[in-house]
Amino acid sequence: MKRMIVLLSALLIGGVAAIRAEVLSLIPRPAQVQETGGEYLFTARTGVKAPKTEAGSVELFGEWLREAYGVELKSGNGRGGLTVLSDPSADDEAYTLSVKPGGITLRGGSAGIFYGLQTLRQLVGETDGHVRVPCVEIADSPRFGYRGALLDVGRYFYSVEYVKRFIDRMARFKLNRLHWHLTDDQGWRIEIKSHPELTRVGAWRSSTQKSKDKTNQDRLPHGGFYTQEQIREVVRYAAERKVTIVPEIDLPGHTMSVLAVYPGLSCTGGPFVVPTEWGVKKDVLCAGNEDTYRFVEEVIAEVIELFPGEYINIGGDEVPKDRWSACPKCRKKIKSEKLRDEHELQSYFARRVGEFVGSKGRRIIGWDDILEGGVVPGATVLSWRDETGGIAAAKQGVGVIMCPAEYLYLDYYQSADIAQEPFSIGHLVPLEKVYSYEPYSRKLTPEQCRHIVGVQGNFWTEYIHSESLMDYMVWPRLLAVAEIAWTDREGRDYADFRTRMPRILAGLDREGILFRIPEPGGLNEAVVRDGKACVELVSPVEGAQIFYTTNGLNPTAKGTLYTGPFEVPLALGTQVKCVVRVPSGRSSAIYTVTNKKMPRQ
Ligand code: ACM
Ligand code: ZN
């Protein structure tokens, strides 16, 4: 299934827009940036002065500066160095950053200071042995308060170390909510002291489905879980990076790992095993059985103790009603609670769990499915199937986090050329599509839009079985999520984002992150001049080399090294193929465009 790209279809007379030699490679793009000329130089004498309350953020920055550039910040003397000031009147996440030749001043709320240091980190560079920062005046604050990423550790277990790295990297781009999807049919990953069997049994499966064919099984045991001590450590680590963890205990569906332990909490009595195949299961927690509510409350009580954030996510997605319809207990509950049907039973379930969570001073988030049986008071809704749920919720004054699958399910393919991509669950969400997402639906009034509290990219892991593959799926798409979440609509422009991305990706390359190397800019466009077509490529990663061919052969290192615009014949069927080799030596897939249509002259 090769993507049919029309080369030369856009007839552009004249040159492509000139690209500034130097761009400030800031992602997400700050609200206001002004380059003021000149630069600040870090030296062996550079000092840092900061309030004690922000010492943690400053220390993280200092550690990075030492490791990346060998610069050791001297503490205590901010004059001519870095001065950090708390601004009690600023929003917690807002900051201003002033870089002058004589010193750097960062002022903001507590999270704002952390974010200002992330911005500063993106500004630091080294040339001719000097560690430099261009002079700028930046005033910045986020568009949305909830800027999230979902990590599904239920389908595949990810180590504590990986989860920390994930948090560290999302925080660097000013994302502030980790939606930690801790339980699913195929694995229960959180230690619950009152129910040790959940992890002793529910965290393990005997085999895993490897492709869309359910019988294609690896026959290898898989599992793992986080102890409460490890979870506390991750929560602490996240807090240092201004990331709040939103734990998800997915209820009442996606609970086969529970039913394998407690078949009595199902409608049929089981028996069950932790499934080895993907897909929505008909067996769910029985919503007519009071034991279910007791169990749920015991679990949630421990979860609340571990996670200090405002939100507890209780799931609620994909609950087939088959078992409930046939279950005498569920039918009885529908009757006794005067509910209309099983959909209202689902909302009843969410309401009851929500009331319990509310009694502990917290609030629930649920997938948009929970709205099908009516509003759940106090709940915030994740609009995932599309925007319909989120729009309906916002119209009713219910808080919404937008993550429609079509734009923000980042387990989907990044390119239509799937032969060259790792096997994925399907569909297509390339970088540009992610970037194009606008959380404020046109179907909502500005007043209703106020209920959209944020946006989130979701990494489901049915087919993401390793940390390196996860990194490939995350980057660079999470950069686009970060910008949608942080930057105002007026400040967003894909072409501009692409000019800021190469330097960021070069940094990720130096860290050894195996991100997907994007197609070079300009590959799909040709400039036609004097009857000739000219292709001008823009490297997607700073310092990368591009090798290309125009004769249909695959470009390896034997292709022509791109050094500037080149001509291609103006003929149907002409192909331009290229590979991008990033500084660490890794090569991209082969990117091909084919001229399918002659331009009108
Ligand atoms: C979901 O993707 N089932 C929320
Ligand atoms: Zn039942």
Image: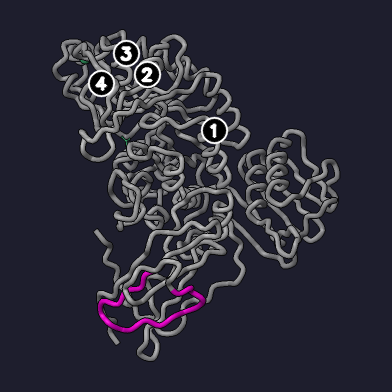
- Image: 470 above or below 158: below
Which is nearer the N-term, disc 3 or disc 2? 3
Q: CA distance from mark 3 to mark 2?
A: 21 Å
**Dot 4 lies on which element?**
loop
Q: Secondary structure at mark 1?
A: helix
Q: Which residue is mark 2?
A: 353
Find residue 391 and report its image quarter. Answer: top left
Nearer the observer, disc 1 or disc 2?
1
Stretch in magenta = 560-578
Q: Helix, strand, or loop for circle 3?
A: loop
Mark 1 lies within 8 Å of ligand 1 (Cβ measured): no
Residue 371 visible somewhere in the drawing: no
The residue labelled by disc 4 is: 284
Question: Which residue: 43% across, 42% down?
Answer: 470
Classify mark 3: residues with Cα within 10 Å, few (<14), some (14-19) or many (20+): many
> Quick check: marks 4 and 2 in contact, CB under 8 Å?
no
Q: Are marks 1 and 4 in contact (CB under 8 Å)?
A: no
* 444 or 271, nearer to the observer: 271
What is the x, y in percent for residue 260? 29, 16
Does 248 sit left or right of 501 as displayed?
left
Q: Quadrant of ligand 1?
A: top left
* Mark 1 lies on residue: 161
Residue 564 part of the magenta segment: yes
Residue 261 is labelled as: 3
Outermost left residue: 326
Sequence-first disc among 4 and 2: 4
**Amino acid carrying mark 4 in the image:** Val
State the residue at coordinates (36%, 11%). 295
The amino acid sitting under disc 1 is Glu
Tell us which disc is closer to us: 1 or 4: 1
